[in-house]
Amino acid sequence: MATEGGKSFARRDKLLEIESKARVQWDKNRVFEAEAHEKPPQPGEKFFGNFPFPYMNGYLHLGHAFSLSKLEFAAAYHRLRGANVLLPFAFHCTGMPIKASADKLAREIREFGNPPVFRHEVVDEEPNPKEESTQDANVAPDKFKGKKSKAASKSGGQMFQWEIMRSFGLSDSEISKFQDPVEWLRFFPPLAVEDLKAFGLGCDWRRSFVTTDINPFFDSFVRWQMRKLRSMGKIVKDVREESVLAAATLRPETMYGQTNCWVLPDGNYGAYEINDTEVVILTERAAKNLAYQNYSRVPQKPTCLVELTGYDLIGLPVKSPLSFNEIIYALPMLTILTDKGTGIVTSVPSDAPDDYMALHDLKAKPAFRAKFGVKDEWVVPFEIIPIIDIPEFGDKAAKKVCEDLKIKSQNEKDKLAEAKKLVYLRGFTEGTMTVGKYAGKRVQEAKPLIRTELIETGQAIIYSEPEKKVMSRSGDECVVALTDQWYITYGEDDWLKLVEECLSNMNLYSDETKHAFEHTLNWLKQWACSRSFGLGTRIPWDEDFLVESLSDSTIYMAYYTVAHLLQNGDMYGYSADLIKPAQMTDEVWDFLFCGGPYPDSSDIPSSVLNKMKQEFEYWYPFDLRVSGKDLIQNHLTFCLYNHTAIMSKDHWPRGFRCNGHIMLNSEKMSKSTGNFKTLREAIEEFSADATRFSLADSGDGVDDANFVFETANSAILRLTKEIAWMEEILAAESSLRTGPPSTYADRVFENEINIAIKMTEENYRDYMFREALKTGFYDLQAARDEYRFSCGIGGMNRDLIWRFMDVQTRLITPICPHYAEFVWGELLKKDGFVVKAGWPTGDSPDLKLKSANKYLQDSIVLMRKLLQKQITGSKKGNKKGAPVSSITEDKLKGLIFVNEQFDGWQAECLQILQSKFDSNSRTFASDGEILKALEQSTSGQAANFKQIQKRCMPFLRFKKDEAIKIGAQALDLKLPFGEIEVLQENLDLIKRQLGLEEVEVMSAADPAASAQAGPLASLLQQNPPSPGNPTAIFLSR
């Protein structure tokens, strides 16, 4: 028995053993290899789903697995119900991170040796066992402890690349090989295949590939795609920044209202040469950005003449473009961020809440001015200059909003953020310029005009930077460079219309996803599709450049359809035998994917060409692409643009399903905190099926989901206990009741199985996997447990138990396929593979029977409470000290009184509510209208109406709430089944559940019935029965 720290892992190890055997059989029988049929598929006959290929600079983690599980469960469902399913998988290696990491490794070897000896490793610190033990004791067992190496701690949190490679389990002798970027491509993709196979992914691995020019076939495909786009005028060349101009913070239209500029007193600045004659003062980070945008005397290398601090700049008189103040001064602001912009900020207190409050503080607090050596004449004379009129805010919007929000100081960051949001948004969307040559124009119109004027007159330059601090995967901070650049013309009017048409016909599974696409289409314009550094495919007409990583991954789903024929199952494309890469000309690709003419000049055998064409035409369009929601703003939208440009409408994508990120135990998954798990680690710790079980239970919407370790551990227990139960049942099969299902419990259990089949199919079809897990496993197990108890001495029906095991196994198959395969073949001795066994069939659910059983179970709970109350009451006696009829807990008789139909004033109330209820909207007429109808009813005309009304009002409120919740049936005068009949049929169950010797069911409408209650008859008046709520009285025999 496997143990670890005293804890047994026998159950998990049993699942791991089951999983290993199942995978061997799947591989041996090529269960997941998909072949196109000769005839085009009818709706529902085929399913092609895919997933954004992961980047191959490390192991796959649970974040990958979570998104991928949505596709895997969907594909497995379609496969189970008989569809021809294609689920391929590939590996992305294009771009800068792998090359940058390889280069970083080489630098470390040059600087520190091979293997490197880092400075922090010279000192070997001895850990304090006592301290370590104390820390561990305070950490919950299901939480990670964040650990940083000494290197990370002493290098600003960034680990050396060598140490990162060690964390992958590589030896020092192996690591040095990774100076070659190709080594990464050879090492990580095969490991990912291992992990995904261990996960149970139902993938056709023959179609896998890696990107970049290391794969000559994929390289040919991307070159064709780029040439195709260029021939259509979709790719153009320009010189511009690679990132978005930070116009939101520049706001050139507000420069008329400047009263000063701000510097950070403790900030580090410098005087940097931007050419042979000009010097600018700004932060080192901003100077570095400018250097990469052709603003430095030495190309791409900022040269600093003198280092300064913000204190050196305070009081500096300056002139500023457009400012109505001829001279303004540099003043201190404590909230400036030097990792954003240049570290120097213009001040416009009329329209910037931060500026208004900072200037207000300086004016109102002489001591504050004195602290930073600010002279009065630098501050006091400068008043707010109105420049923009905003409806409701006026022409001094910042002042108005700050006063409305009762902001007292520049240190109230949260309130100022709210104020800024209000002013900036309204100013841009509704503001009107009141000064300057564009007075009277809306801010939206004036902004670009002023910006252009400032640039053309030499008063400003374009400065670009990432929207936030960006660290490359190699650990270096990213800057924005200015380069010759190739662009894809996304946003072009005619092209955008095609994308919008495509989107309107797609299944996006949520309104949030649809709105996110619409938002992206509103702002997305030209996209830089080339890079000068990294790995990838060369731009075919300009080989100094590479195709960037988001531009070679837009239509590769089509490549899956022919990859196995091109590459012969080799993900690198080296083992091809049918076709050579040079044979894949543009004419061939056009023929395969674009309906082009047969390539007569091609020397590829016609049978092979036609087979590839058939594969594409059969599988395309793809039915589903699953992705994290963060890819909507780039990759997924690019996918739509490229498909609509290159392919015919009948090949446009059919569906995108987007999900949120995944948390681990309700905390953000993060390597830096240690709250992180690779897919391999999860499988080793929980098994594949328990991991999949917890992923299914994590959530299905676009909000962030939560992978809970306890759920995975619970799944191990549930699955292995279920195996043990089935083994036990099958061993004692001869003791089960034979013959067709006949009892009430049989009918209820059979109905619950039919309900599970129907509800679980709906949930899988809608890709609601948590709900599928609930209806197909949790609810079905609860029904089985209830059935087992309900059967009593008669025992369970053999045919029903076999049906239950069959159905439950199939319903859980998409989520836990290895477990299901074991049950199917080893326990149930069924032929074939459960993953292709077909969706179980069943009769239509009997909702009346389900309702009747709920009534029975609820009634038993109610009667148990009444019994306990009566026993307790008999022991205490009544308030006056007279004994209640004494009963003991043994040899009890139960009298159940049932009133099957409302009558009298209750019936009238229900009839009134029925007439005033809209069943479609589940709304009622006004209370006044209902009360008026009540007053006009027979009860309303009664002499004692006041008394009746006191009982009517609570009853009306209760029934209204119930109808709003469950619908019009709540207003029926009686239940849709006979209550007495249900109770009579289950007397044995009631006796066993309540521990009674005898039970009798009586109608409360029978005058003779209450007499049997003897001295306890008064309890009937205190708690009269009503439809759905029987009353029970208990007597000692």
Image (cartoon, rainbow, N blue to C red):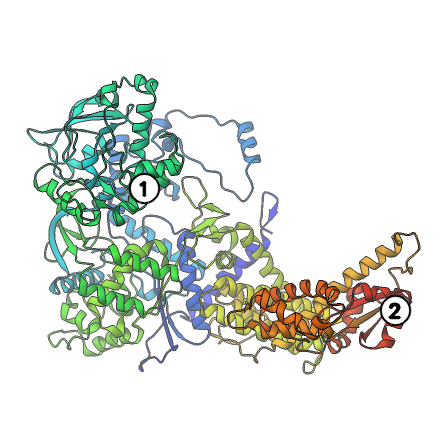
Going by the numbered disc 1, the residue's amino acid type is: Ile
- SS assignment at label 2: loop
Neighbours of disc 2 within 10 Å: few (<14), some (14-19), many (20+): some
Q: Residue at x 56, y 42 (%)?
A: 141
Viewer-proximal residue, 856 or 428? 428
Q: Nearer the viewer, mark 1 or mark 2?
A: 2
Q: Residue at x 38, y 78 (%)?
A: 45
The residue carrying mark 1 is 175
- The disc at residue 496 is none
Viewer-proximal residue, 1032 or 298? 1032
Q: Quick check: 986 above or below 892?
A: below
Q: Quick check: 451 above or below 853?
A: above
The quadrant of the image that shows the C terminus is bottom right
Q: Residue at x 67, y 83 (%)?
A: 740
- Mark 1 and mark 2: span between their CA atoms? 87 Å
Going by the numbered disc 2, the residue's amino acid type is: Ala
